[in-house]
Image: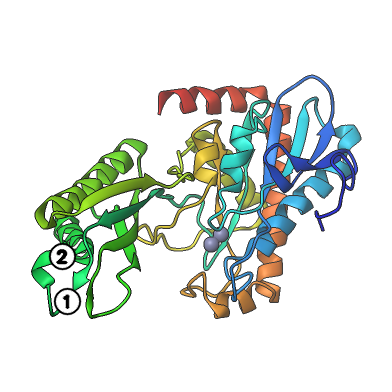
Amino acid sequence: MAHGVPRGQGVPGGAWGLDGVETAFRATLDRGAGPTLAILCEYDALPGIVHACGHNVIAAAGAGAGAALAGVRDRLPPGRIEVIGTPAEEGGGGKVKLIRGGVFERVDCAMMIHGFDRTLLHQDLLGIVPTTFEWRGKAAHASADPWEGVNALDACVQTFNAISMLRQQMRPDCRVHGIIVDGGAAANIIPGRASATFYARAPRIDTMWELQRRVVACAEGAARATGATLTVVQGDTVYEPLKRNQTLLDLFAANMATVGLAEGAPIPDRLGSSDVGNVSQVIPTIQPMIGIAPTGMAIHTREFAAAAVEPLARTGMLAAAKTMALTVVDLLADPGWLRAAQAEFGRR
Ligand SMILES: [Zn+2]
Ligand SMILES: [Zn+2]
């Protein structure tokens, strides 16, 4: 839809193609001087399993909240509402680019919802630092002259072993996982080059960088042990943890009750990541989880993609849209809520 649409056209009162992201959009409802509140829409999908993360529901709920507010625009208190389309969450870091482009500089707080197998007011999101290691050794014939070689794959395997030991010393809400990207060309050649990519995840920015430091140390130790040289390339797109804002969550919870949305059983160890975390580190932000699939169904599965277009998903989507619209009205009507949210943001 976005391709070929010139900047500044295609959305009434808004624009396609925000700074840094061609397929982002912003639709603005301007009621004059007052706070600027953002509702975020995700609308990307997963390769092969499409809307297995329910982003179709996220986008429609955000657009629905915006449409509901537009329907009563003449009766809204002063302020500005921006529905911001933020694509490329599944790995592309769309919101990271939008933050760098300055899209959130004029926004006071943001909210979005995410589809899940149950409704939860808040679910932690882990930050992610992606890191790629490349070890360089010396290729040699694996049978005729193995002693002439420096085995870069050994350094890679040693790194996996060291990280496996590190895992015992990690906090239970941290994660490290990786893959071998290059493990050599043939079994009869001592690999002169090997490469692996790891993600270090943690629920706080400081613990995330500390974990990353320890993962790099594992690769450095393995390089030293094997005689390989190591190059460390940190991924460009770091997803930051979700910074909780209880003030906005309390307001959202009151409106959930109004529309009849009840919370499910907490599931605190089921932890993912999202670039909405980066937004939450810049301005007060919430991302409640909304039940759009049967309880117990995992996201990123074909079953979840099928559920995301069923009546249950539609019910969740409509309830989420109403709750976000009501929360925006409350924030506009009583500026004390936003001041409290911003004060809390500064304290955490
Ligand atoms: Zn996802
Ligand atoms: Zn998602």
Residue that label 2 marks: 149
Q: Secondary structure at mark 1?
A: loop
Residue drawn 61% across and 52% down? 113
Locate residue 9 relative to residue 23 in the image: left or right: right
Q: Does the image show residue 187?
A: yes
Decide if ligand 1 comes within 8 Å of the CB at mark 2.
no
* Image quadrant in which the N terminus is located: bottom right
Figure quadrant of the C terminus: top left
Q: x and y percent of residue 125 in the render?
A: 43, 50
What is the spatial separation of the Cα atoms under label 1 and label 2, in whole angstroms? Answer: 8 Å
Instruction: Tell me where residue 123 appears, x and y as whole percent.
Output: 45, 52
Q: Residue at x 60, y 28 (%)?
A: 337
Marks 1 and 2 in Cβ contact (< 8 Å): yes
203 with respect to 113 (left or right) = left
Q: x and y percent of residue 83 in the render?
A: 75, 43
Q: Eyeballing the image, is 176 above or below 40?
A: below
Between 234 and 76, the one lying in front of the other is 234
